[in-house]
Image: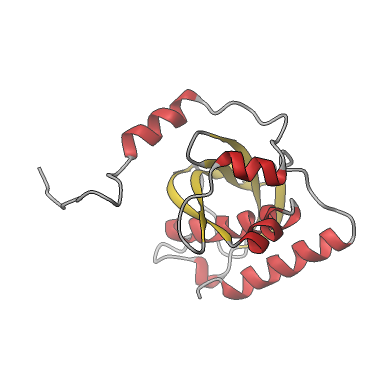
Amino acid sequence: MNVIWRTLLVIFRARLRNRRGRRMDVTDIGRIRLTTLPTDLDILRHMNNGRYLSLFDLGRWDLLIRTGLFDVMKDRGWYAVVSSETVTFRKSLQLWQRFDIESRFIGHDDRALFLEHRAVVDGEVYARVIMRARMLRRNGGLVHHDELFATVGRPEGVPEIDDWIHDWVSASALPSTRVPAPSVWS
């Protein structure tokens, strides 16, 4: 609920842009403009590190709606879940500071889709997240890429995923939900 009003506003604006013919291609970079609000701050009076991830969700909503993928997902009973993400902070966003969230699809592997989000001020990157998401069915099960791409088309012009991202996925993976994952500290 912490960003529900912003989420609803982003969804409304994305749908409005689509109606006005400003639909995006899946390889385009989505941009939304935000302002750092008092509710975004931590005790040090700059953007809370956890808030970045919540605000990057707004960029994902904009991207899904403006590319038309959200409607396809809704019609088929699909939804995306974040399976892992990594964030790097470079500069702090301050109270009332205006910034853009830039979002783009950066590729896929055999199990997941990858997106990149950036917090940008005057063309300068303040923070970046790489996010890995899986497509699931509301009635259970994984949506495989062959079905996804048969429905929406295989995107052309998507860059290759950097090797370090593949390494990160392997290094940060947890066991499957079908096997135990006890919390044992070494």
* Residue 57 vertical position relative to residue 86 in the rendered view, above or below: below
Which quarter of the figure has residue 104? top right
Q: Position of residue 71 (x, y in %)?
A: 71, 60
Q: Is residue 19 visible?
A: yes
* x 71%, y 45%: residue: 152
Name of the residue lying farthest toward the right: 20
Does residue 124 appear in this view? no
Farthest residue to the left: give it. Answer: 186
Q: Quadrant of residue 97?
A: bottom right
Instruction: Tell me residue 170's x, y (percent).
Output: 35, 33
Q: Is residue 116 left or right of residue 34?
A: left
The image quadrant where one finds the C terminus is top left
Image point (82%, 65%), residue name: 16
When the figure is inspected, residue 76 is found, relative to residue 160, above or below; the finding is below
Residue shown at the point (47%, 24%) measured from the top left: 163
For this rendering, which residue is in front, 131 or 176? Answer: 176
| Residue at horizontal 50 percent and vertical 45 percent from the top | 131
Q: Along the line of sight, which residue is nearer the eye, 15 or 71? A: 71
Left or right, 111 with respect to 72, comes to left
Question: Horizontal and vertical percent for residue 109?
Answer: 51, 33
